[in-house]
Amino acid sequence: MVDWTEKYRPSTLSAVRGNDKARDALAEWAKTWDDHREAVVVYGSPGVGKTSAAHALAADMGWETVELNASDQRTADVIERFAGRAAKNATLVGSTGGAGGGRQLVILDEADNIHGNYDRGGASAVTRVVKNSNQPIVLIANDYYDMSRGLRNACQEIEFRDVSARSIVPVLRDICRREGIEFEADALDRIAETNDGDLRSAVNDLQAAAEDGERLTVDDVVTGDRDRSLGVFPFLDAVLKEESAEEAIGSAYRVDETPDDLTKWIAENVTKVYEGAELARAYDHLADADRWLGRVRASQEYGYWRYATDALAGGVASARDGSKGGWTRFNRPQFWPSSDSTADEVVRKVAENGGFSMATARREALPFLAAMTHHCKPRELTVAMAAHYDLDEAAVSFVTGSGETTNKVESIVADAREMRESAMEAHSGAFGGDLASVDGTADDADGADAAETDADETDADETGAAEATGTGADADDADDADDGQSGLSDFM
């Protein structure tokens, strides 16, 4: 069956519903592009028509389009090769005539998923392309402030707001008439109210409710509608403690949260209930859910949400060995997107060290670090983590959930710094340094003869002299230094 969201995608800007002011601003940007020659960022919640508006604009202007999805292809090389090449064309080869004047609209989707050097130069490459473009560029983003400041400053911005239920109903009515489906007005009202803000989701719900018949009634919609009466904390109890896999999936559809947010809630709290093999199986299912969510972000195909829901609810529930009792204090996701400076700094360090995006660090790496070092246990692993990422007390507290000013956290940070210093000292010789000669041997009674030897002795000879002191500077020192570095290398 053809996806109705694609079948009825607006072919002209005048058909874009619910964002008249933003639609008109986008049209004005295009008409005056030769005067300002700036790119534009179109941002807003998923499903409000941002990408559809960009394609409709190109059709209205007679421009051809080049589209690049930033979440899949965001390296500097790919961006320069595809978007950069298109943006530098003075005219579109073979299309110098016509109403479009040879213009080519470059559409960069998921622009808020590019984070500087952590995406291998992606953000800086986009900024270069934007500043040097000979063609109009539309960047699509869900969160404007997740984009780099340099990129924001190089663009105009237009916000697409959530589509009201009043604006959704005419779209649903038009689709029903085109599909030859009779409908009750209350049925369309119910779909629009349920999906208030998300036009794409409303169209998907309409197709799901109407696919089995030629008449759409309120009962059809109620049958497929989610009962939103279940709160997130009862949902956590249901998945992590009580319900079967099938029941947990049903509960997931009764919560007024997206699968993306539900995954965060479970990842934050699963360690409070599961342990050992249960926890390992649960994390496997959460990783599976995150893969499906990644496909949603990459393709904007929200039908994949059902598979993410199966994994995060049914999969995690199935990982449990029997039911659990008692009361558990559940926490709001610790890595909820925010402007918290400590959170941002930890995310930045993890992303930079791992060579991946900040979004990946926040969603995938940090939950595992938190689970592995929860309340600073095991201590050795927590010290290695703090040393590996050079974390201070506030950062260690953020990751582990332990108090920042506690003796436990302070001692872990102190040991981590000692570990880093030891590792750097062990490898300082690679830069021409000679720590043994810097330390001197004045206090080495047994090493006096070694000090009188040829000044050009090898490092091995100096090490032998140090071993003769009897003060502990023997071969074990080298082993200790190696162990410290090995701990850092083996951590990730």
Image (spheres, rainbow, N blue to C red):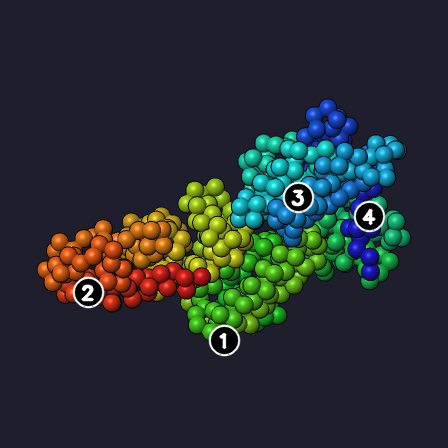
Q: Nearer the viewer, residue 232 or 474?
A: 474
Q: Nearer the viewer, mark 4 or mark 1?
A: 4
The amino acid beneath tag 2 is Glu
Residue at disc 1, secondary structure: loop
Q: CA distance from mark 4 to mark 2?
A: 80 Å
Residue at disc 4, secondary structure: loop
The amino acid beneath tag 1 is Gly
Assess whether mark 2 and mark 4 are in contact (beta carbons under 8 angstroms): no
Q: For mark 1, what is the residue?
A: 322
Work out whether mark 1 precedes mark 2 in sequence or the reverse, and give the earlier one.
1
Q: CA distance from mark 1 to mark 3?
A: 53 Å
Q: Nearer the viewer, mark 3 or mark 4?
A: 3
Q: x and y percent of residue 201 in the render?
A: 71, 51
The amino acid beneath tag 4 is Tyr
Q: Nearer the viewer, mark 1 or mark 2?
A: 2
Work out whether mark 3 precedes mark 2 in sequence or the reverse, and give the earlier one.
3
Assess whether mark 3 and mark 1 are in contact (beta carbons under 8 angstroms): no
Q: For mark 3, what is the residue?
A: 80
Q: For mark 2, what is the residue?
A: 467
Q: CA distance from mark 3 to mark 2?
A: 57 Å
Q: For mark 4, what is the residue?
A: 8
Q: Nearer the viewer, mark 1 or mark 3?
A: 3
Horizontal side of 443 relative to 420 (left or right) equals left
Residue drawn at the location 79% of the way across and 55% of the way down: 3
